Amino acid sequence: MSTLPSPVGRPSAFFPRTHRRVAAALAATFLLCAAYGGPAAGDEIDDNNEEREALLELIADNDGRREELQHDLEGVSADLSNTLVDLQLTREQIPVAQEALAQAEDDLAASERHQEQVEGRLEVAEQDLSDVESEISAGEEAAQETSDALGELARSAYRGDAAPSTLALITESASAEDFIGSYSAVSTATRTQSTLLTRVAEESAENRNQRLRQDTLATRVSDLNDEAIEAVAESERLRNEHSDRVDELDGLEALQEDLVAELEGREDDLNGEIAAIGRSNTTTELQIAAIDEENRRLEQERLEEERRQQEAAEQERLRQEAAARQAQLEREQNTPAPQPAQPPAPAPTPTPPPTSTPDPPAQTGATFIPPIPRPLTVTSPYGPRIYPITGAWSIHPGVDLRSACGNSQVAIADGVVEATNPAAITGTSGNQVIVNHGIINGRSTVSTYHHLSGFAVTPGQHVSQGQVIGFTGATGNVTGCHVHLGLFLDGQMTDPMPYL
C-alpha cells in the first residue's frame, strides 16, 4: 500500500460517528466565520440577520462544493465517495481555520495594545488629578493663613489699633529719630496689609483655576476608566474567540488524522473501484469502436457505390457518344447521289440507362441539441480525474449536467439506437443508451446516456433529434440523479459541451 500524503479526512453513512464529527467541525467553522467581528450593541439585530445570511450562503457553498466533489468521484461506491468528499472538505477548511486563527491573534494583540495604552493614559490622568488635589489642598492651607492674617488686621482696626497719621507721628514724636522709627513701622504695616490683600486675590484665583482643572481631570479619569473597562472586555472577548479558533483548528487537524487512518485501511478498496471504472469505460469504448468500424465500412461502401455509379454513368455517356458518331458515319456512306439539299434529320437524343437508387447520403452539416432543456449546469466536466489517497486517475468520458430524477432526456441528433444496456452489465455506467448518428460532417458520431432510471427506446429503433430516449436517474455508482452525456467522434471520446 502506498504512503499517504498529508493528513486528510472523511465521514460516511458507514462511519456515522466520524460523519457527525465532520459535519460538526465544518458547522463550527462556518459559525465562527459568520460570527467573526462581533456586532455593536445598537446594530445587534441587523448584524445578526447579516450573520444568518452569511451562514446560509456558506452552507449553500459547502453543499455545492460537496455536490461537485461527489460528481468528480462518480463510479466510486457511496461510502468511499462520502469519505473522500468529507476528507477533501476537511482539508479545504484547515487553511480557512488557519487564516482565521492568524487574524484572531492579530486582533487580540491589537486589542491588548489598545488596552495597555488606555490603562497608561488612565494612570497618567489619575496622577495628574492627585497632583492637582494636593496643590488645591496646599493652596487652601495658604489661603487660610492669609485669611487669618487679614482677620487679625481687621480685629486690630476694630480695637482702634489703626496706624496714626503722619501729623500725629510728628506731634507725638520726641525726636527726629523717634519719628523715623514710628513712620517706618507704620509704612511696614501698611505694606503688609496691601500684600495680604493681593495674596488673597491671587490665591482665590489660583484655587478657582485648580478647581476647574480638577473637574476636567476628574471627567477624563472617568471617561478613561470607562474606556479601560471596555478595552478589558473586548480583550477578553477576543481572547475567548482566539481560544475557539485554536480549538477549531485543533479539531479539524485531529479529524483529519482520524479520517486518514480510516481511509488507509480502504486504499485497496478504492483502487479496486477505480479499476472497475476503467473496465466500464473500456467496455463502452469497445462498443463504440465496433460501431465506428461499422460506420466506416458502410461509409466506404457508400462512397464505393457512388464512385461505381459515376464510372458507369461516364462509360454509358461515352458509349452513347460513340454510337451516335457511328450512326452518323453510316448515314453519310449510304447517302445516294446528291439530291437537292434537305435538312438533315436531327440525331436522336441518347437515353441513359436506368441506374439503381443509392442509399440516402449520410448526415452533413447537422447540429446537436442538449439532452435536457437549457440552461445547462455542469456539475462535473469532461476530462481527467485524480483520486485522493492513491493518486490514481481516470478519464471522465462525458459531461455531467444537473437534472432532477425522472426528467426526460432526448437524442441530441437523428440516429439509430445501438444498445440499451442495463445497469447489471455496465457496472458504474448504470442504465445506458448508445445512439449511432452515423457520419456527421465527415465523422463517425455516437452519443451515450448513462445512469438512466428507465428506457424509452429499444435497440435498432430509429430516433429523431429531440425524441425522448430515457429518464434521468442515479443507477450505477453515483450519489444522485443527473445527466451523463458522452460524445464519441471517430471512436474517440470528446468533450460534448462545445457541440451543444
Image: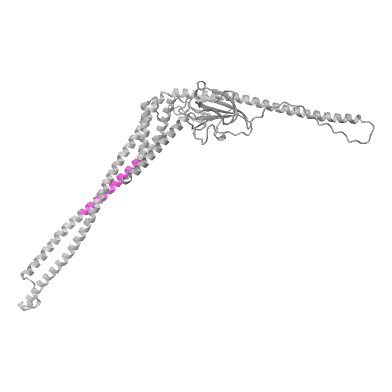
Left or right: 153 as drawn, with respect to 334: left
* Residue 269, quarter of the rendered image: top left
In the picture, which quadrant includes the C terminus?
top right
Residue 472 falls within the magenta-colored stretch: no
390 or 287, which lies in front?
287
* Residue 110, quarter of the rendered image: top left
398 or 249, which lies in front?
398
Q: Is residue 369 visible?
A: yes
Task: Give the percent coordinates (x, y) of residue 288.
Answer: 58, 25
Q: Which residues are magenta?
A: 102-129
Task: Give the percent coordinates (x, y) of residue 360.
Answer: 67, 28
Q: Main secondary structure of the magenta part?
A: helix
* Residue 10, quarter of the rendered image: top left
Q: Is residue 176 visible?
A: no
Residue 202 versus residue 425 in the image, above or below: below
Q: Residue at x 85, y 30 (%)?
A: 325
In the picture, which quadrant includes the N terminus?
top left
Task: Give the percent coordinates (x, y) of residue 243.
Answer: 31, 37
Q: Residue at x 39, y 35 (%)?
A: 94
Q: How many marks?
A: 0
List the single residue furthest toward the top.
424
Left or right: 293 as drawn, with respect to 349: left
Task: Give the percent coordinates (x, y) of residue 387.
Answer: 46, 28
Residue 120 falls within the magenta-colored stretch: yes
162 or 323, which lies in front?
323
**Colour treatment of the image:** one colour
